[in-house]
Image (cartoon, rainbow, N blue to C red):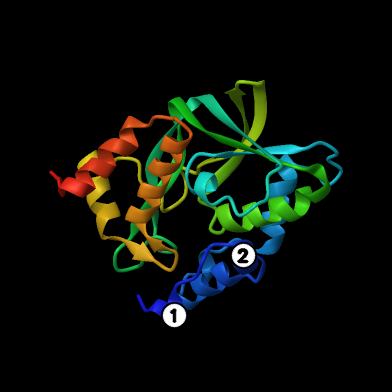
Amino acid sequence: MKSEERIVLNRKNIKADKLRSLVRKQGLGSKLLDDDTLLKSRRSLVPDNTKKDIWIFGYGSLIWNPVIKPIKKLKVKSYGYRRKYCLKTHIGRGSKECPGLVLGLENGGSVTGQALKINNKNIFEELDLVWRREMIMGAYIPKIISGYSEEGKIDMIAFTINKKHENYIGSLSEAETALMISKAQGFLGTATDYLYKTCESLKILNLNDQYLKRLQARIINKNFV
């Protein structure tokens, strides 16, 4: 991929719609969700008359590059979902020629991460950024789930995997997953970098994910069998 096709995932580029512009250039414009669909999706969880602060659950890149401006962050654990590489991507961290993988939340088990609190005064500006980022092609289903922190229970928005999406891929072995991650890159960088940064962000929070550690070890040791 040419260097001029790379962009940084930040507020400015999301607001300028550069993510969707690059997707259109790659011939995938028909897969994009339009503004009306994004707004309807957001309103289904957070109506326009909402007066309270909102929490977002970060379990992957939302931890180390949230883009939004949270007023508070808390370590949380949620039950009934697990973090898994189950979403094939031809954009961002992959390409048509060499698809990558990114994380989703699948049913079962438990998952740790970080809850990000958004002030009600800026709620719709911040949520618009989140939706334009996470729901760009409708691969996730946003839901309200419960997280448990040192301050108690938190209701938070989580982007769970849409198993009906064409890019959902739930049957890969860890060896196949690691190999796919090791080879892929897109306009946001490599899939390996995404994995390593997620592992590092969890380590900083003193959170443990053996699944991600095993994938990282396989890539480092080139163990794809």
Circle 1: element type: helix
Residue 189 in the image: x percent, y percent? 40, 63
Q: Residue at x 32, y 34 (%)?
A: 211
Q: Considering only vertical position in the picture, is 77 above or below 116?
A: above
Quarter of the rendering occupied by the C terminus: top left
Q: Residues within 10 Å of mark 1 (few under 14, many from 20)?
A: few
What residue does disc 2 label? Answer: 14
Callout 1, which amino acid?
Answer: Glu
What residue does disc 1 label? Answer: 4
- Left or right of 99 in this view: 117: right
Q: Nearer the viewer, residue 224 or 36?
A: 224
- Left or right of 78 in this view: 90: left
Residue 199 in the image: x percent, y percent? 38, 41
Residue pushed farthest front?
A: 204
Callout 2, which amino acid?
Answer: Ile
Q: CA distance from mark 2 to mark 1?
A: 17 Å
Q: Considering only vertical position in the picture, is 220 above or below 153?
A: below
Q: Residue at x 56, y 64 (%)?
A: 32
Q: Residue at x 56, y 59 (%)?
A: 136
Asked if the residue under mark 1 is in contact with the one under mark 2, i.e. CB atoms within 8 Å, the reply is no
- Say which label, 2 or 1, has the lower sequence index: 1
Residue 91: in sight, yes or no? yes
Find residue 172 and report its image quarter.
top left
- Left or right of 149 in this view: 112: left
Residue 103 in the image: x percent, y percent? 42, 45
Q: Residue at x 20, y 43 (%)?
A: 218
